[in-house]
Image (cartoon, helix red, strand yellow):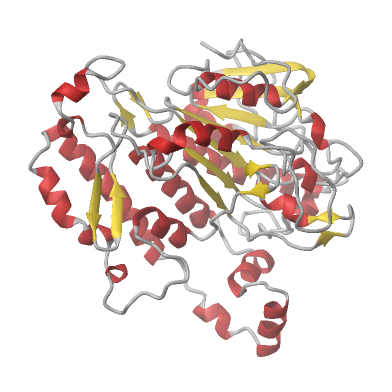
């Protein structure tokens, strides 16, 4: 990592490393004066993509009016607090998700590559090229502790889809370092936290007296005291707010519902069967019993927020479910069936209502992400203002497996590079890759084209 002004201070202790938000009082005045924008710190841009499986209720997504004078549709109502920082983009189509293989999986793997997906039943996957998040990470990652982070809610799928004759691996990732190299994802909030803030070594057993037994804030308290003596009041308050957020996540992780009582009621034969199927008891519980995963989703989001806030990473992806997810959402009032099942609704009003309610839950998680970012000040703006947070699904309507007029949103202006607060309808079958090309342009990453892009959306650029 270089010694530019973008490098952040970190708190260190035995077994813990906590990156801090930018603290102006800790930067030498002569270094601050040499920043590209004079005496003020140039805020970094961030990018994230949030994926939702199984499409959306097609009749409750798009607002009735175009332009700025629009009212949010029923599905988008959870976003009302950040409406002015939102783009709703209609008419987009991922052309290379249509071909000889239908279904869900080839409409997920290339959501961020927009290239053809190779048909295979094994591990020799190929998404056609690097995903836009990883291209951004290649350009920005050297300035952060983590070039990018990839989170999800479900374990990697395996086996072959009986309906399409294609590997389910394609439904488990949207982030690709190259066409043949998918990025691994973290699906456990505690593991995601430990990888972010502790000197975590996968598979290594920790000693009984190691610092993992205490809060990371206790481990770094000497460094906190040292830095506090060097900071002004404003930066002390900023650090206190940030460390409070870290501690809040630790407490919520400690309070996650234990599965001990649930496991006590699982018979040995069921345990053996799940083991043979390579399914964990907690995963089986979430899917078959309708366990409420809202807190799990919010914890993952809050860890991403901390990563952006501290500049530990500037690029993230979060899959709210694998492609064709059969998660049981009966924890939502009025929902009794699994997500994939209700997405094949056959226009049945009962299933359509459940499809809508599950879609609203996903919108609530995206809204939570945007609101958390919008609540954190960065100079005269907010963390959301300096970010571009895409939301999307590879399908419009799960019933029709329709990849046309995709449900695509963007929150934030990327540091004032994008216009916001509009509902825009592009011509039918406008390449989704044009949006990715626009993200790259907004981040000053020059490419002739991305995927099957035909250009960028110059109307979105400031």
Picture quadrant where residue 423 is located: top right
Instruction: Please give the count of numbered marks on the rendered protein.
Output: 0
Confirm whether residue 131 shows in the render.
yes
| Residue 249, percent from left and from top | 36, 55
The x, y position of residue 69, in whole percent, is 59, 13
Viewer-side residue, 392 vs 95 = 95
Q: In the rendered view, would you say 14 is above or below 238?
A: below
Q: Residue at x 61, y 26 (%)?
A: 72
Q: Residue furthest left?
A: 229
The residue drawn where x is 65% and y is 52% is 321
Image position, residue 312 (x, y; %): 38, 43
Left or right: 29 in relation to 66: left
Is the residue 259 above or below the residue 215 in the image? below
Image vertical order of residue 159 relative to residue 125, above or below:
below
Q: Nearer the viewer, residue 460 or 245?
A: 460
Q: Residue at x 65, y 37 (%)?
A: 130
Residue 376: x percent and y percent? 34, 34
Q: Residue farthest to the front?
A: 2
- Front residue of this view, candidates 315 and 303: 315
Residue 20, relative to residue 201: is it above or below? above
Whether residue 403 is visible to the viewer of this picture, yes or no, is no
455 to the left or right of 11: right
Write down the quadrant of residue 347 in the picture: top right
Q: In the image, 223: left or right of 288?
A: left
> In which quadrant will I find the N terminus?
top left
Q: Residue furthest bottom?
A: 268
Residue 422: quarter of image: top right
């Amino acid at each position: 990592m270089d010694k530019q002004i973008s490098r952040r201070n970190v708190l260190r202790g035995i077994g813990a490393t906590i990156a801090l938000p930018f603290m102006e009082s800790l930067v030498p005045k002569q270094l601050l004066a040499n920043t590209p924008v004079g005496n003020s710190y140039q805020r970094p841009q961030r990018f994230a993509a949030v994926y939702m499986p199984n499409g959306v209720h097609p009749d409750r997504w798009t607002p009735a009016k175009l332009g700025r004078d629009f009212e949010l549709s029923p599905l988008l109502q959870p976003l009302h607090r950040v409406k002015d920082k939102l783009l709703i983009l209609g008419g987009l189509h991922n052309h290379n998700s249509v071909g000889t293989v239908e279904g869900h999986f080839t409409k997920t793997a290339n959501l961020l590559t927009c290239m053809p997906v190779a048909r295979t039943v094994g591990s020799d996957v190929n998404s056609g090229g690097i995903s836009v998040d990883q291209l951004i990470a290649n350009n920005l990652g050297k300035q952060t502790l983590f070039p990018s982070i990839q989170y999800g809610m479900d374990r990697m799928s395996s086996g072959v889809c009986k309906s399409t004759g294609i590997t389910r691996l394609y439904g488990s990732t949207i982030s690709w370092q190259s066409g043949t190299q998918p990025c691994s994802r973290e699906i456990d909030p505690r593991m995601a936290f430990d990888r972010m803030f502790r000197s975590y070594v996968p598979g290594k057993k920790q000693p009984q007296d190691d610092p993992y037994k205490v809060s990371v804030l206790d481990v770094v308290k000497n460094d906190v005291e040292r830095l506090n003596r060097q900071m002004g009041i404003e930066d002390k308050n900023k650090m206190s707010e940030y460390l409070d957020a870290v501690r809040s996540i630790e407490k919520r992780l400690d309070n996650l519902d234990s599965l001990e009582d649930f496991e006590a009621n699982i018979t040995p034969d069921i345990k053996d069967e799940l083991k043979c199927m390579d399914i964990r008891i907690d995963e089986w519980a979430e899917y078959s019993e309708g366990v409420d995963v809202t807190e799990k989703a919010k914890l993952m989001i809050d860890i991403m927020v901390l990563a952006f806030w501290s500049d530990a990473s500037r690029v993230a992806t979060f899959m709210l479910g694998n492609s064709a997810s059969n998660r049981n959402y009966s924890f939502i009032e009025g929902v009794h069936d699994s997500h994939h099942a209700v997405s094949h609704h056959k226009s049945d009003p009962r299933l359509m209502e459940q499809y809508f309610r599950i879609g609203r839950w996903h919108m609530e998680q995206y809204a939570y992400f945007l609101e958390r970012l919008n609540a954190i000040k960065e100079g005269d703006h907010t963390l959301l203002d300096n970010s571009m947070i895409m939301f999307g699904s590879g399908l419009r309507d799960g019933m029709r497996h329709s990849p046309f007029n995709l449900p695509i949103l963007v929150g934030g202006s990327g540091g004032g590079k994008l216009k916001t607060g509009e509902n825009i309808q592009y011509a039918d079958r406008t390449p989704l890759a044009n949006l990715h090309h626009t993200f790259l342009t907004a981040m000053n990453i020059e490419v002739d084209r991305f995927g099957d892009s035909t250009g960028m959306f110059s109307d979105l650029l400031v």
